[in-house]
Every structure is written in structure tokens, then in C-alpha cells.
Amino acid sequence: MSAQTVTLEADKDGSGPLFRLRGQLGFAGVPGVLASGRQLFPASGDVRLDLGGLDSVNSAGLALLLEWQHEFKRSGREMKLLNIPATLINIARLSELEPILAITA
């Protein structure tokens, strides 16, 4: 993977839709993955988003997650974040955004 590559993958298990972000989620990758999410996420129901495959994330990644959270809440749904990287937790903590992203670590 190049330094600017991030992918969003869909998977299904017994608990419903599961999506995984992999790679480096930064300024260059956010526009593409934002568009991918809008195509891949189901129109109804909650989803889980596994962040454990991220090699790195910055404030642009945080902004992306905030946008997705907003879109889901606006439609009465929930996006549950799994395996949140420590870097993202720290950025959210410094920005006082932990409650919005439902980060409890």
C-alpha cells in the first residue's frame, strides 16, 4: 500500500453489516473513502466499522468519521466503531470529540 492508500471493505457475519478500514487514513485518502462509504453502506440499519486495519490516521480521518456519524444519526441509525487506534482516540480526546464518536477507551 502506498502512503496515501486507504480502503473500505464490506463483510457480513452473524451480527450484521461489518465494514473495515485499512491503510493510512489521511488528507489524500478521505475524499475517496467518503464516496466509497456512501456507496457501500446500506440505506437502512446500523453498521459496525472496524478501524483495526488502519496503519495511521490523522485529523482528516477524524473528520471523516464525524461526517459518517452525523449522516447515520440524521437517518436514525448508528455506526459503532470497533478497534479504534490509540492515535485516533488521542486526537478525539484533544478535540473533545470522544462523546460524539462514542469513544469509551
Image (tube, rainbow, N blue to C red):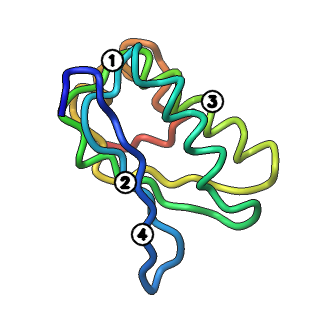
Label 2 – label 1 distance at C-alpha: 17 Å
Label 2 – label 4 distance at C-alpha: 8 Å
Disc 4 marks a residue whose amino acid type is Asp
Helix, strand or loop at mark 4? strand
Residue 61: horizontal and vertical position, in percent? 42, 25
Residue 35: horizontal and vertical position, in percent? 60, 35
Using the image, tell me which numbered label, if any, was put on residue 58: 1
Q: Which badge, 2 or 1, is on the more N-terminal residue?
A: 2
Q: Residue furthest bottom?
A: 14
Helix, strand or loop at mark 1? loop
Q: Which badge, 4 or 3, is on the more N-terminal residue?
A: 4
- 49 above or below 102? below
Which residue bears the numbered disc 3?
67
Label 4 – label 3 distance at C-alpha: 22 Å
Q: Which badge, 3 or 2, is on the more N-terminal residue?
A: 2
Q: Tell me where residue 41 sits by quadrant.
A: bottom right
Q: Which of the two discs, 4 and 3, sits closer to the camera?
A: 4
Which residue bears the numbered disc 4?
11
Residue in the image at 49% along x and 35% along y: 33
Label 3 – label 1 distance at C-alpha: 15 Å
Disc 3 marks a residue whose amino acid type is Glu
Q: Are marks 2 and 4 in contact (CB under 8 Å)?
A: yes
Q: Please state, as top left, top right, bottom left or bottom right, where the N terminus lies in the image.
A: top left
